[in-house]
Amino acid sequence: MSLELRGRARRLGDRIDTDAIVSSVRKKETLDPDELKRWLLAGVDPGFAATVRPDDVLVAGDAFGCGSAMEVAVTVVLAAGIRAVVARSFSRTYYRNAINNGLLPVECDTTAVAEGDALTLVVGRDGVQVVDETRGTTIPARPLPPFAVEIIRAGGLVPYLRRNGGFGEGDA
């Protein structure tokens, strides 16, 4: 059940809503995440998308993904090569859309994480931890249910269901 991701912290603030993640104006043009990724977080920083590297980790404050429940606000993050978002809290719809699409949502105190810090996210039987390699600190995080970890490991809900032919016993 273990999962480990490494990446560079990309620091954001509180209440990053889905329209800041990908603008409604852009979504009127296309819903293709590979096209939209060049506009990722343009509502926060117009040049942000050009600075993203594969495996970057978005680090935010409270209520990440608030606003509308558009799934494209998750798929555009994944299309940019980002596999995890660490935040103090998420909107419930963004959190579930993240799991359903294979994006790792980690809830913890993000106060001490700075832009550019090297992070290792460890999801195991003992819970979830964010290791800030730059600062030499470990931040405990809210645990994820085992079924959610398996969905993320499979790359999302659809690949999980294809692989398993449905939910396993005890999965929700």
Image (tube, rainbow, N blue to C red):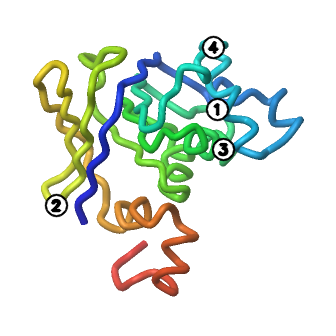
Name above or below for residue 26 compared with residue 145.
Answer: above
Mark 2 / mark 3, whichever is N-terminal: 3
Residue 59 in picture, x, y percent from top left: 39, 26
Residue 31 in picture, x, y percent from top left: 79, 45
Q: Which is closer to the viewer, label 3 or label 4?
A: 4
Residue in the picture at 68% in, 44% down = 72
> Circle 1 sits on which residue?
18
| Disc 3 secondary structure class | loop
Residue 170 in which image quadrant:
bottom left
105 on left or right of 18: left
> Circle 2 sits on which residue?
125
Mark 1 to mark 4 CA distance (whole Å)? 17 Å
Mark 2 / mark 4, whichever is N-terminal: 4
Mark 3 / mark 4, whichever is N-terminal: 4
Which one is nearer the viewer's eye here, 19 or 121?
121
- Residues under numbered marks 3 and 1 in contact, where contact means CB atoms less than 8 Å apart: yes
| Disc 1 secondary structure class | helix
Mark 3 / mark 1, whichever is N-terminal: 1
> Circle 3 sits on which residue?
69
Name above or below for residue 131 compared with residue 144.
Answer: above
